[in-house]
Image (cartoon, grey):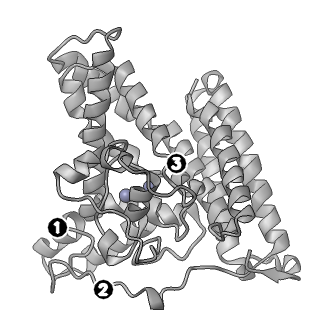
């Protein structure tokens, strides 16, 4: 049974708790459409992993069995501690290349596409990352760590990163030096100049200090969350594909092979004219994406998200009883429902639901 099945209700409960605490403190840190989109992106990621996520476990097993250099005693705590440290080190490079190589950014960008920063943002995970992330963990396989250890430390890393997506927790003193915290991860999600390409750590922040990518959160500058080329959509499918589409268009219009390769493998800010065409961020000219949507449409989206969550949970429980074609069909159908709902939220006026648009709100 997928352990994420037990984490999903906890994740959702804490999102509600954070929403309630923020409201009671008079803080506006949520947008309902954004939070629903984040949850839907998270579910789409889980359904995509259900189809292809076993690649990483299969590849790890093959490499560890054939080339594993050492035999590790799983009853020795040092096995687990060293594996966690090494996994987190590899994660640092997965994450750093995910920002600094355009084709990998196309996959990771979805996590940064929210202009809010709250616990729901943590669920905005890529639906394409499973295709290549396993490559970065090959060192653990070559060292011969058992696949069970790889899966468990990967899960610890993943679960740890949930709680750091909140604005309700301030700086945590000396912990900032060792661990990824809400404060230093807020910097990672910022689009202010000082935030760009900073704080890539998963559990530990000392990797960033070692490799010169660490930045402390500034108290004199309000952090603006999101990406410089805004997504401007509530559609989880588009959130996963938009940067790939842009790269495709750039490659198609490029004048020579060097430019084509650079569009794919250079930094996302690369242009033929400039190695780094990043412009200075102007917080005064930033406005958050929103769309008019009726309360009825928002309620409908809420119900669809809740039902799809139940269907995801059911999938976790019953997947072993389903045939492979049925599993794949089920997951594709769920992803299409999520994409359809995202389209409906983004373009309510074109969605022939004009009868729902009696009362407009910007909820
Ligand atoms: Zn990132
Ligand atoms: Zn994050």
Q: In the image, which is nearer the foreground, mark 2 or mark 1?
A: 2
Of helix, strand and loop, which one carries label 1?
Answer: helix
On-image quarter of the N terminus: top right
Q: Earlier in the sequence, mark 2 or mark 3?
A: 3
The quarter of the rendering in which ligand 1 is drawn is bottom left
Q: Quadrant of residue 175?
A: top left
* Spatial CA span between label 2 and label 3: 33 Å
- In the figure, is residue 227 to the left or right of 167? left
Residue 21, compared with residue 12, is above or below; it is: below
Query: Do residues under tags 2 and 1 come within 8 Å of each other at their CB atoms?
Result: no
Q: Residue at x 35, y 84 (%)?
A: 281
Q: Residue furthest bottom?
A: 285
Q: Which mark is residue 261?
A: 1
Of helix, strand and loop, which one carries label 2?
Answer: loop
Viewer-side residue, 156 vs 21:
21
The spot of residue 41 in percent (x, y) is: 56, 55
* Spatial CA span between label 2 and label 1: 26 Å
Of helix, strand and loop, which one carries label 3?
Answer: helix
Viewer-side residue, 15 vs 28:
28
Q: Provide the residue designation for mark 3.
A: 45
For mark 3, does the 10 Å Cα neighbourhood hold few (<14), some (14 to 19), or many (20 or more) residues? many
Q: Quadrant of residue 188?
A: bottom left
Q: In the image, which is nearer the foreground, mark 3 or mark 1?
A: 3
Q: Earlier in the sequence, mark 2 or mark 1?
A: 1
Residue 246, compared with residue 102, is above or below; it is: below
- In the figure, is residue 322 to the left or right of 187? right
Asked if residue 92 shows in the view, the reply is yes
Q: Which mark is residue 280?
A: 2
């Amino acid at each position: 049974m997928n352990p994420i099945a037990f984490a999903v209700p906890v994740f959702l409960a804490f999102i509600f708790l954070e929403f309630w605490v923020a409201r009671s403190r008079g803080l506006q840190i949520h947008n309902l459409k954004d939070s629903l989109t984040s949850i839907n992106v998270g579910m789409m990621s889980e359904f995509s992993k259900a189809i292809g996520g076993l690649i990483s476990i299969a590849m790890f097993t093959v490499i560890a069995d054939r080339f594993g250099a050492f035999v590790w005693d799983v009853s020795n705590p040092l096995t687990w501690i060293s594996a966690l440290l090494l996994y987190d080190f590899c994660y640092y490079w997965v994450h750093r290349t995910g920002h600094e190589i355009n084709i990998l950014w196309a996959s990771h960008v979805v996590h940064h596409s929210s202009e809010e920063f709250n616990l729901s943002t943590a669920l905005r995970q890529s639906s394409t990352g499973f295709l290549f992330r396993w490559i970065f963990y090959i060192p653990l396989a070559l060292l011969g760590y058992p696949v069970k250890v790889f899966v468990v430390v990967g899960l610890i890393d993943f679960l740890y990163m949930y709680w750091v997506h909140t604005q309700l927790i301030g700086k945590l003193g000396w912990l900032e030096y060792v661990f990824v915290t809400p404060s230093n991860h807020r910097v990672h999600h910022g689009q202010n100049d000082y935030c760009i390409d900073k704080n890539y750590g998963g559990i530990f922040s000392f990797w960033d200090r070692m490799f010169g990518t660490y930045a402390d959160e500034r108290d004199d500058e309000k952090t603006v969350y999101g990406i410089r080329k805004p997504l401007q959509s509530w559609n989880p499918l588009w959130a996963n594909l938009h940067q790939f589409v842009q790269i495709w268009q750039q490659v198609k219009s490029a004048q020579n092979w060097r430019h084509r390769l650079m569009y794919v493998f250079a930094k996302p800010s690369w242009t033929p004219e400039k190695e780094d065409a990043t412009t200075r961020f102007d917080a005064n000219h930033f406005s958050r994406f929103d769309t008019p949507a009726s309360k009825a449409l928002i309620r409908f989206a809420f119900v669809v998200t809740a039902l799809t969550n139940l269907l995801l949970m059911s999938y976790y429980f019953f997947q072993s009883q389903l045939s492979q074609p049925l599993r794949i069909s089920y997951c594709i159908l769920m992803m299409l429902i999520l994409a359809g709902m995202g389209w409906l939220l983004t373009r309510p006026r074109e969605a022939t639901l004009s009868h729902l648009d009696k009362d407009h709100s910007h909820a």
